[in-house]
């Protein structure tokens, strides 16, 4: 299956050669979760705080499907 992964801020630095404009075109196995996808590209799940799949809040345990767009975000701070 084909999915597109987009990484935010500090997560980008964990994937050598990551292009923030293009994201990553990936071909994970059927049944792969968002957490497994993160680990497969070198991002420890403990570094991921927010998961969005197709623009909706999701979880690391969510299974991915053909054509999904996955966005991963680290913990964010601010005030």
Image: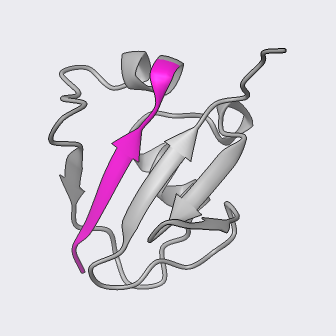
Is 29 left or right of 59, judged from the image as shown? left
Q: Residue at x 61, y 54 (%)?
A: 51
Quadrant of the image for the C terminus?
top right
Residue 26 locus on image (x, y percent): 23, 59
Q: Residue at x 67, y 47 (%)?
A: 50
How are the residues colored?
one colour
Task: Decide whether residue 18 is among the magenta residues.
Answer: no
Looking at the image, residue 79 lies above or below residue 19: above
Quadrant of the image for the N terminus?
bottom left
Looking at the image, residue 34 lies above or below residue 5: below
Q: Residue at x 27, y 79 (%)?
A: 67
Q: Which residues are magenta?
A: 1-9
- In depth, the one of 48 and 31 nearer the eye is 48
Is 65 left or right of 9, judged from the image as shown? left
Looking at the image, residue 64 lies above or below residue 72: below
Residue 59 locus on image (x, y percent): 70, 64
Looking at the image, residue 63 lies above or below residue 46: below
Numbered label tally? 0
Residue 30 locus on image (x, y percent): 38, 84
Q: Quadrant of residue 34?
A: bottom right
Q: Quadrant of residue 36?
A: bottom right
């Amino acid at each position: 299956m084909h999915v597109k992964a987009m990484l935010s801020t500090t997560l980008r630095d964990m994937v050598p050669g990551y292009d923030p404009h293009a994201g990553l075109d990936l071909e994970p196995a059927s049944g792969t979760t968002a957490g497994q996808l993160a680990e497969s590209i070198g991002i420890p799940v403990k570094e991921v705080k927010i998961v969005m799949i197709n623009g909706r809040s999701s979880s690391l345990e969510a299974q991915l499907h053909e054509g999904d767009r996955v966005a991963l975000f680290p913990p964010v701070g601010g005030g």
